[in-house]
Amino acid sequence: MLGSNNNRVQSRLLRVFVLQLVLISIVTVIGVLTASLIVERLLVNKALRGEAEFFWDRRAESSEFQLPETMNLIAFLSSDQNRPVPISYRQLGLGQHRVDNEGQRQVVHVSERNGERLYLLFAGGTVSNLAFYFGVLPLILVLLTMYSFAFLTYLLSKQAVSPITRLASVIETFDFNKRDATELNLANLERSTNSETGILVEALDHFVERSQASIERERNFTRFASHELRTPLAVIQGSASSLELLDLEGAPARAVQRIKRTSRQMGDLLNTLLLLAREEGEADTENCSALNVNDLIDTLVAQLSIVHADEANTVEVEHREQLSVKAPESVLTIVLGNLLGNALSYTRNGRIVVTVDYGRVLIEDTGVGMDKESVEKAFEPFFRASTDNDSHQHQGLGLAIVKQSCRNYGWVIEMDSVLGEGTWVSIEF
């Protein structure tokens, strides 16, 4: 998802900006309506009341005092027969009213004294003009100013988070499973010493370098240790094979068999260490040929039954389906060999059943079993779960490589066990 982080952050900023505009607009509309009400109900009403009071005071001094009449103000008096009050205004009560007359909106103020009524008509257009100049126009200017500041804030915020979003985008699109962490290129990001992003990039660079160095040291140790141990191991195995040619009996013969068994286990351990150091991420099976799992199971059962002959177990193989898997033979041998070896090692005078089904291999035994806690930790490296028999201890390095190999090749492995009754392990390819 290239640039998805950048898009998410910018969309959040845009939403905040739009929300600000909406809130500002709502406040502005409320302000405009309030300004109109203030202009009409306070300023105009106060002016008309004052005009009416002034007229009645002068009227009390002289009955000939003329009605006020200007460009925006027209007056009618109920007792004036020469200028009768329009019919549309006669039904109005005392106080201020808004009246639509011939398409024009007017503000009408009605007052009464000594039985006479005074009607003051103020042009509605003038009220609108007053509301615009004293209310709407200043608010528009304020609105434009606030919009400008909000947009400037949006641009500055976008500029401030841009390096962080680019950093997030680089990290998100980098496939750590398929590429080396040292290939993570952060050179194009800002590295200003005063920039929080620069500090973050620098810290991330140091973290990647230290992590890569630590991983490389572990890999080198595994490779070198495994390689250097192969030579003495080969000498031991060759010597044991030479001793087998002698006609040995009793304790010497058993000692040779123990040496061979131990050296074989040592060889398996070395192969496991090498595979752990070499296998990373999802394995490539495009160049692998299909391997017949049924034949491999028969071969492994025959070999391991000889190695574990002392356990006196019965091994049954049930081939329900012919199963072929595209994977290296060494990987399948280690995976199935470890599971079969565990079943044989932790079962005495019992029964092991291996079932090859459609896309699946199931291994069941009647051995010592494990409790639930041990089952959950069985695939952890070097986990050891002691059983009632001190000579039987589950060693988790083999199961750890089994778990990792299944993960690398996309296989699903499941295990369940009952202490004292046995264990079953299933692999779905």
Image (cartoon, rainbow, N blue to C red):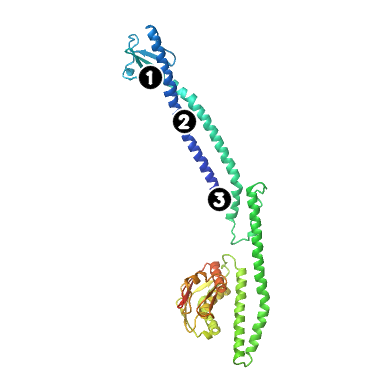
Q: Quadrant of residue 103?
A: top left
Numbered mark located on residue 31 in the image? 2
The answer to whether residue 262 is above or below residue 371 is below
Pointer 3 or 2: first along the chain: 3
Q: Position of residue 267 (x, y in %)?
A: 62, 78
Image spot of residue 166 (x, y percent): 60, 50
Along the line of sight, which residue is nearer the eye, 295 or 401? 401
In contact (CB < 8 Å): disc 2 and disc 1: no
Where is residue 53 shown, x and y percent of the image?
Answer: 40, 14
Callout 1 environment at 10 Å: few (<14), some (14 to 19), or many (20+)?
Answer: many
How busy is the neighbourhood of tag 2: few (under 14 within 10 Å), some, or many (20 plus)?
some
Indicate the secondary structure of the residue bearing disc 3.
Answer: helix
* Left or right of residue 367: residue 225: right
Rendering quarter of residue 218 = bottom right
Q: Looking at the rendered structure, which numbered label has been put on residue 108? A: 1
Q: Secondary structure at mark 2?
A: helix
| Up-down relation of residue 408 to residue 75 (above or below) | below
Report the amino acid beneath label 1: Val
Q: Amino acid at mark 3?
A: Asn
Which marked residue is nearer to the observer: mark 3 or mark 1?
1
Crowd class of label 3 (few under 14; some 14 to 19; many from 20; radius 10 Å):
some
Label ID, residue 9: none
Which residue sits at x=61%, y=74%?
Answer: 271
Residue 135 in view, yes or no: yes
Q: Which residue is mark 3?
A: 5
Mark 3 vs 1, N-terminal side: 3
Name the residue rendered at 56%, 35% in the picture: 148
Percent across and percent down for residue 168 are: 58, 52
Residue depth check, mark 3 versus mark 2: number of the one nearer the observer: 2
